[in-house]
Image (cartoon, grey):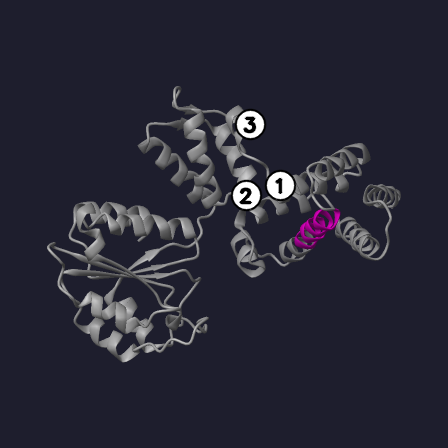
Protein backbone atom coordinates (compact mmCIF):
# COMPACT_ATOMS: atom_id res chain seq x y z
CA UNK A 1 0.00 0.00 0.00
CA UNK A 2 1.05 3.63 -0.39
CA UNK A 3 0.95 6.35 2.27
CA UNK A 4 -2.49 7.58 1.13
CA UNK A 5 -3.91 4.08 1.59
CA UNK A 6 -2.17 3.80 4.96
CA UNK A 7 -3.85 7.03 6.09
CA UNK A 8 -7.29 5.66 5.20
CA UNK A 9 -6.59 2.31 6.85
CA UNK A 10 -5.41 3.82 10.14
CA UNK A 11 -8.58 5.94 10.30
CA UNK A 12 -11.03 3.09 9.65
CA UNK A 13 -9.52 -0.17 10.95
CA UNK A 14 -7.49 -1.47 13.86
CA UNK A 15 -3.76 -0.89 13.20
CA UNK A 16 -1.54 -3.85 12.46
CA UNK A 17 1.08 -4.85 15.00
CA UNK A 18 4.06 -4.43 12.63
CA UNK A 19 4.65 -2.10 9.67
CA UNK A 20 7.54 -1.64 7.25
CA UNK A 21 7.75 1.75 5.50
CA UNK A 22 10.25 1.36 2.66
CA UNK A 23 11.50 4.05 0.25
CA UNK A 24 13.73 7.08 -0.21
CA UNK A 25 11.09 9.83 -0.51
CA UNK A 26 11.64 11.56 2.83
CA UNK A 27 8.43 13.57 2.69
CA UNK A 28 6.42 10.33 2.38
CA UNK A 29 8.32 8.79 5.29
CA UNK A 30 7.53 11.89 7.36
CA UNK A 31 3.85 11.74 6.38
CA UNK A 32 3.66 8.09 7.40
CA UNK A 33 5.22 8.90 10.79
CA UNK A 34 2.64 11.64 11.39
CA UNK A 35 -0.19 9.21 10.65
CA UNK A 36 1.20 6.64 13.08
CA UNK A 37 1.66 9.23 15.83
CA UNK A 38 -2.04 10.11 15.56
CA UNK A 39 -2.78 6.61 16.87
CA UNK A 40 -1.71 7.78 20.33
CA UNK A 41 -3.62 10.62 22.05
CA UNK A 42 -1.50 13.80 22.47
CA UNK A 43 -1.48 13.61 26.26
CA UNK A 44 -0.09 10.04 26.14
CA UNK A 45 2.66 10.49 23.55
CA UNK A 46 5.46 11.34 25.98
CA UNK A 47 5.16 7.94 27.65
CA UNK A 48 3.81 5.78 24.83
CA UNK A 49 5.76 6.84 21.71
CA UNK A 50 9.34 5.65 21.35
CA UNK A 51 11.79 6.58 18.58
CA UNK A 52 15.01 4.67 18.03
CA UNK A 53 17.83 5.20 15.51
CA UNK A 54 19.44 1.87 14.65
CA UNK A 55 22.73 3.55 13.75
CA UNK A 56 23.19 4.55 17.39
CA UNK A 57 20.83 2.32 19.42
CA UNK A 58 20.60 -1.51 19.59
CA UNK A 59 17.37 -3.01 18.26
CA UNK A 60 17.05 -4.85 21.60
CA UNK A 61 16.31 -1.49 23.27
CA UNK A 62 13.45 -0.84 20.85
CA UNK A 63 12.13 -4.39 21.36
CA UNK A 64 12.15 -3.94 25.15
CA UNK A 65 10.01 -0.84 24.66
CA UNK A 66 7.71 -2.69 22.25
CA UNK A 67 7.14 -5.50 24.77
CA UNK A 68 6.18 -3.05 27.54
CA UNK A 69 2.54 -2.41 28.32
CA UNK A 70 1.15 1.03 27.39
CA UNK A 71 1.41 3.56 30.21
CA UNK A 72 -2.15 4.64 31.13
CA UNK A 73 -3.27 4.16 27.54
CA UNK A 74 -4.42 1.56 25.03
CA UNK A 75 -1.53 1.58 22.57
CA UNK A 76 2.24 1.93 22.47
CA UNK A 77 3.98 3.12 19.29
CA UNK A 78 7.61 2.22 18.62
CA UNK A 79 9.37 3.78 15.60
CA UNK A 80 12.56 2.05 14.45
CA UNK A 81 14.49 4.33 12.10
CA UNK A 82 17.33 3.43 9.68
CA UNK A 83 17.35 -0.36 10.24
CA UNK A 84 20.47 -0.81 8.11
CA UNK A 85 20.76 -4.45 9.18
CA UNK A 86 17.90 -5.16 6.75
CA UNK A 87 20.17 -4.10 3.85
CA UNK A 88 23.64 -5.05 2.69
CA UNK A 89 24.96 -1.72 4.00
CA UNK A 90 27.03 -1.15 7.11
CA UNK A 91 25.92 1.29 9.75
CA UNK A 92 27.93 4.38 10.65
CA UNK A 93 28.41 3.29 14.24
CA UNK A 94 29.45 0.00 15.83
CA UNK A 95 26.10 -1.13 17.23
CA UNK A 96 25.45 -4.78 18.07
CA UNK A 97 21.92 -5.75 17.00
CA UNK A 98 20.05 -8.75 18.42
CA UNK A 99 18.66 -10.18 15.17
CA UNK A 100 17.56 -13.50 16.75
CA UNK A 101 15.62 -11.48 19.31
CA UNK A 102 13.92 -9.53 16.52
CA UNK A 103 12.98 -12.78 14.76
CA UNK A 104 11.46 -14.05 18.01
CA UNK A 105 9.45 -10.84 18.43
CA UNK A 106 8.12 -11.02 14.87
CA UNK A 107 6.85 -14.55 15.63
CA UNK A 108 4.78 -13.21 18.54
CA UNK A 109 4.39 -9.38 18.36
CA UNK A 110 2.85 -7.52 21.28
CA UNK A 111 -0.88 -6.90 20.48
CA UNK A 112 -0.98 -3.51 22.25
CA UNK A 113 2.10 -2.21 20.38
CA UNK A 114 2.45 -0.88 16.84
CA UNK A 115 6.05 -1.46 15.80
CA UNK A 116 7.09 0.54 12.72
CA UNK A 117 10.32 0.06 10.76
CA UNK A 118 11.20 3.21 8.80
CA UNK A 119 13.61 2.08 6.08
CA UNK A 120 14.85 5.01 3.93
CA UNK A 121 16.37 2.69 1.32
CA UNK A 122 15.61 1.74 -2.27
CA UNK A 123 15.48 -1.94 -1.38
CA UNK A 124 16.30 -4.46 1.33
CA UNK A 125 18.53 -7.52 1.18
CA UNK A 126 15.97 -10.18 0.35
CA UNK A 127 18.46 -12.97 1.05
CA UNK A 128 18.45 -12.26 4.78
CA UNK A 129 16.21 -14.36 6.99
CA UNK A 130 15.13 -11.32 9.02
CA UNK A 131 14.01 -9.50 5.85
CA UNK A 132 11.97 -12.47 4.67
CA UNK A 133 10.35 -12.76 8.09
CA UNK A 134 9.65 -9.03 8.35
CA UNK A 135 7.99 -8.84 4.93
CA UNK A 136 5.84 -11.84 5.88
CA UNK A 137 4.83 -10.42 9.27
CA UNK A 138 4.52 -6.69 8.50
CA UNK A 139 2.23 -4.49 6.45
CA UNK A 140 4.54 -2.99 3.82
CA UNK A 141 4.06 0.71 2.97
CA UNK A 142 5.64 2.12 -0.18
CA UNK A 143 7.57 5.39 0.26
CA UNK A 144 9.45 5.28 -3.05
CA UNK A 145 9.74 8.57 -5.00
CA UNK A 146 6.56 9.39 -6.93
CA UNK A 147 6.68 9.68 -10.69
CA UNK A 148 5.28 12.77 -12.42
CA UNK A 149 1.72 11.43 -12.75
CA UNK A 150 1.59 10.29 -9.12
CA UNK A 151 3.07 13.57 -7.87
CA UNK A 152 0.47 15.58 -9.80
CA UNK A 153 -2.38 13.47 -8.47
CA UNK A 154 -1.13 13.63 -4.89
CA UNK A 155 -0.73 17.43 -4.93
CA UNK A 156 -4.21 17.91 -6.43
CA UNK A 157 -5.66 15.53 -3.82
CA UNK A 158 -4.01 17.37 -0.94
CA UNK A 159 -5.12 20.77 -2.25
CA UNK A 160 -8.69 19.54 -2.64
CA UNK A 161 -8.75 18.25 0.94
CA UNK A 162 -7.56 21.69 2.08
CA UNK A 163 -10.29 23.41 0.02
CA UNK A 164 -8.05 24.69 -2.80
CA UNK A 165 -8.02 24.26 -6.57
CA UNK A 166 -5.17 24.62 -9.07
CA UNK A 167 -5.51 25.08 -12.83
CA UNK A 168 -3.65 22.96 -15.38
CA UNK A 169 -1.22 25.70 -16.43
CA UNK A 170 -0.24 26.29 -12.81
CA UNK A 171 0.33 22.59 -12.23
CA UNK A 172 2.45 22.33 -15.38
CA UNK A 173 4.54 25.30 -14.20
CA UNK A 174 4.94 23.77 -10.74
CA UNK A 175 6.08 20.44 -12.22
CA UNK A 176 8.56 22.19 -14.50
CA UNK A 177 10.08 24.35 -11.76
CA UNK A 178 10.48 21.44 -9.33
CA UNK A 179 11.44 18.74 -11.86
CA UNK A 180 8.36 16.83 -10.66
CA UNK A 181 10.02 16.24 -7.29
CA UNK A 182 7.09 15.58 -4.95
CA UNK A 183 8.98 16.84 -1.90
CA UNK A 184 9.66 20.20 -3.58
CA UNK A 185 6.13 20.35 -4.99
CA UNK A 186 4.62 19.80 -1.55
CA UNK A 187 6.88 22.38 0.12
CA UNK A 188 6.04 25.02 -2.49
CA UNK A 189 2.34 24.16 -2.39
CA UNK A 190 2.27 25.14 1.28
CA UNK A 191 3.56 28.61 0.32
CA UNK A 192 1.11 28.86 -2.58
CA UNK A 193 -1.80 28.11 -0.24
CA UNK A 194 -0.85 31.12 1.86
CA UNK A 195 -0.70 33.33 -1.25
CA UNK A 196 -4.08 32.02 -2.48
CA UNK A 197 -5.71 32.07 0.97
CA UNK A 198 -8.62 34.31 -0.06
CA UNK A 199 -9.38 33.02 -3.57
CA UNK A 200 -8.66 29.36 -2.71
CA UNK A 201 -7.40 28.99 -6.29
CA UNK A 202 -3.81 28.77 -7.56
CA UNK A 203 -2.98 30.04 -11.05
CA UNK A 204 0.22 30.00 -13.11
CA UNK A 205 1.17 33.61 -12.28
CA UNK A 206 1.31 32.69 -8.58
CA UNK A 207 3.62 29.78 -9.33
CA UNK A 208 5.87 31.95 -11.52
CA UNK A 209 6.13 34.64 -8.83
CA UNK A 210 6.63 32.37 -5.85
CA UNK A 211 8.35 29.15 -6.95
CA UNK A 212 12.01 29.65 -7.96
CA UNK A 213 13.49 27.79 -10.90
CA UNK A 214 16.31 25.44 -10.01
CA UNK A 215 19.75 25.79 -11.55
CA UNK A 216 19.05 22.59 -13.53
CA UNK A 217 15.86 24.11 -14.95
CA UNK A 218 17.56 27.37 -15.95
CA UNK A 219 20.41 25.41 -17.52
CA UNK A 220 17.93 23.24 -19.44
CA UNK A 221 16.67 26.38 -21.20
CA UNK A 222 20.31 27.25 -21.96
CA UNK A 223 20.94 23.76 -23.38
CA UNK A 224 18.04 24.17 -25.79
CA UNK A 225 19.29 27.58 -26.92
CA UNK A 226 22.81 26.20 -27.49
CA UNK A 227 21.55 23.29 -29.57
CA UNK A 228 19.49 25.66 -31.71
CA UNK A 229 22.60 27.81 -32.30
CA UNK A 230 20.70 30.77 -30.86
CA UNK A 231 23.68 32.89 -29.80
CA UNK A 232 21.80 35.96 -28.46
CA UNK A 233 19.47 33.78 -26.35
CA UNK A 234 22.34 31.57 -25.13
CA UNK A 235 24.49 34.52 -24.07
CA UNK A 236 21.54 36.23 -22.39
CA UNK A 237 20.71 33.13 -20.33
CA UNK A 238 24.37 32.62 -19.41
CA UNK A 239 24.62 36.24 -18.25
CA UNK A 240 21.46 35.82 -16.17
CA UNK A 241 23.00 32.82 -14.41
CA UNK A 242 26.16 34.80 -13.65
CA UNK A 243 24.06 37.73 -12.42
CA UNK A 244 22.27 35.30 -10.09
CA UNK A 245 25.59 34.69 -8.30
CA UNK A 246 26.03 31.22 -9.83
CA UNK A 247 29.69 30.20 -10.07
CA UNK A 248 31.01 29.70 -13.65
CA UNK A 249 32.43 26.27 -12.81
CA UNK A 250 29.11 25.19 -11.31
CA UNK A 251 27.17 26.43 -14.34
CA UNK A 252 29.53 24.62 -16.67
CA UNK A 253 29.38 21.43 -14.58
CA UNK A 254 25.57 21.36 -14.82
CA UNK A 255 25.77 22.03 -18.57
CA UNK A 256 28.22 19.15 -19.01
CA UNK A 257 25.95 16.92 -16.92
CA UNK A 258 22.90 17.83 -19.02
CA UNK A 259 24.65 17.11 -22.31
CA UNK A 260 26.06 13.85 -20.95
CA UNK A 261 22.51 12.83 -20.04
CA UNK A 262 21.22 13.76 -23.50
CA UNK A 263 23.94 11.65 -25.16
CA UNK A 264 23.10 8.70 -22.90
CA UNK A 265 19.39 9.06 -23.69
CA UNK A 266 20.14 9.22 -27.42
CA UNK A 267 22.05 5.93 -27.19
CA UNK A 268 19.45 4.18 -25.04
CA UNK A 269 16.58 5.40 -27.21
CA UNK A 270 18.36 3.93 -30.24
CA UNK A 271 18.48 0.61 -28.37
CA UNK A 272 14.71 0.77 -27.84
CA UNK A 273 14.60 1.13 -24.05
CA UNK A 274 11.47 2.52 -22.41
CA UNK A 275 11.42 5.76 -20.41
CA UNK A 276 11.12 3.82 -17.16
CA UNK A 277 14.07 1.59 -18.01
CA UNK A 278 16.19 4.61 -18.92
CA UNK A 279 15.35 6.36 -15.65
CA UNK A 280 16.22 3.25 -13.67
CA UNK A 281 19.45 2.53 -15.57
CA UNK A 282 20.69 6.14 -15.40
CA UNK A 283 19.35 6.68 -11.86
CA UNK A 284 17.63 9.96 -12.77
CA UNK A 285 14.09 11.20 -12.19
CA UNK A 286 11.62 10.03 -14.89
CA UNK A 287 10.61 13.65 -15.53
CA UNK A 288 14.17 14.53 -16.56
CA UNK A 289 14.14 11.56 -18.93
CA UNK A 290 10.85 12.75 -20.41
CA UNK A 291 12.22 16.25 -21.07
CA UNK A 292 15.53 14.90 -22.34
CA UNK A 293 13.91 12.56 -24.85
CA UNK A 294 11.81 15.44 -26.13
CA UNK A 295 15.07 17.32 -26.80
CA UNK A 296 17.24 14.56 -28.30
CA UNK A 297 14.64 13.71 -30.93
CA UNK A 298 15.31 17.11 -32.53
CA UNK A 299 19.12 16.90 -32.73
CA UNK A 300 21.79 14.58 -34.09
CA UNK A 301 24.35 12.71 -32.00
CA UNK A 302 27.10 14.80 -33.61
CA UNK A 303 25.44 18.03 -32.43
CA UNK A 304 25.24 16.69 -28.87
CA UNK A 305 28.84 15.42 -28.91
CA UNK A 306 30.25 18.68 -30.30
CA UNK A 307 28.51 20.70 -27.58
CA UNK A 308 29.68 18.29 -24.88
CA UNK A 309 33.32 18.40 -26.00
CA UNK A 310 33.21 22.19 -26.31
CA UNK A 311 31.99 22.48 -22.71
CA UNK A 312 34.74 20.12 -21.52
CA UNK A 313 37.24 22.55 -23.10
CA UNK A 314 35.59 25.45 -21.22
CA UNK A 315 35.94 23.51 -17.96
CA UNK A 316 39.63 22.95 -18.64
CA UNK A 317 40.16 26.66 -19.35
CA UNK A 318 38.22 27.72 -16.24
CA UNK A 319 40.45 25.53 -14.08
CA UNK A 320 43.80 26.36 -15.69
CA UNK A 321 43.54 30.00 -16.87
CA UNK A 322 42.25 33.36 -15.66
CA UNK A 323 40.25 34.05 -18.81
CA UNK A 324 36.83 35.68 -18.45
CA UNK A 325 34.10 32.96 -18.17
CA UNK A 326 31.67 34.96 -20.31
CA UNK A 327 34.29 35.35 -23.05
CA UNK A 328 35.02 31.63 -22.96
CA UNK A 329 31.32 30.88 -23.39
CA UNK A 330 31.07 33.35 -26.29
CA UNK A 331 34.00 31.64 -28.04
CA UNK A 332 32.38 28.26 -27.44
CA UNK A 333 29.11 29.43 -29.02
CA UNK A 334 30.97 30.94 -32.01
CA UNK A 335 32.86 27.70 -32.71
CA UNK A 336 29.77 25.55 -32.12
CA UNK A 337 27.63 27.65 -34.47
CA UNK A 338 30.29 27.44 -37.18
CA UNK A 339 30.26 23.66 -36.94
Counting residues from the start of the chain, the first of labels 1 and 2 encountered is: 2
Q: Label 2, on which residue?
A: 179
Question: Is disc 1 in contact with disc 2, using a CB cutoff of under 8 Å?
Answer: yes
Question: Considering the numbered disc 3 on the image, is that residue within a helix, a strand or a loop?
Answer: helix
Question: Considering the numbered disc 1 on the image, is that residue within a helix, a strand or a loop?
Answer: helix
* Residue 303 in view (yes/no): yes
Question: Is disc 2 in contact with disc 3, using a CB cutoff of under 8 Å?
Answer: no
User: x%, y% of residue 174?
Assistant: 51, 35
Task: Give the label on residue 111, or none.
Answer: none
Mark 1: give few (<14), some (14-19) or many (20+) Cα within 10 Å.
some
6 and 40: which is toward the camera: 40
Q: Label 1, on which residue?
A: 217
Residue plotted at (55% across, 43% down): 179
Q: Label 3, on which residue?
A: 209
User: x%, y% of residue 248?
Assistant: 75, 47
Residue plotted at (87% across, 48% down): 323
Counting residues from the start of the chain, the first of labels 2 and 3 encountered is: 2
Amino acid sequence: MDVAELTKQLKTTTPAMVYLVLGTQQVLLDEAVQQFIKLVPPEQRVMNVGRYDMETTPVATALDDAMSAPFFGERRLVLVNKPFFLTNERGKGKVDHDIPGLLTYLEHPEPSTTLVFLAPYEKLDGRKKVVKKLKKSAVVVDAAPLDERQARQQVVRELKLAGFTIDQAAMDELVQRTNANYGLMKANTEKLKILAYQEKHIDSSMVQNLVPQSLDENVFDLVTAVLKHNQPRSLSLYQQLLAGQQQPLQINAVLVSQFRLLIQLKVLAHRGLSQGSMASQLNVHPYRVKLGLRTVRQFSMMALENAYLGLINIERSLKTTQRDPELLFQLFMLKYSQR
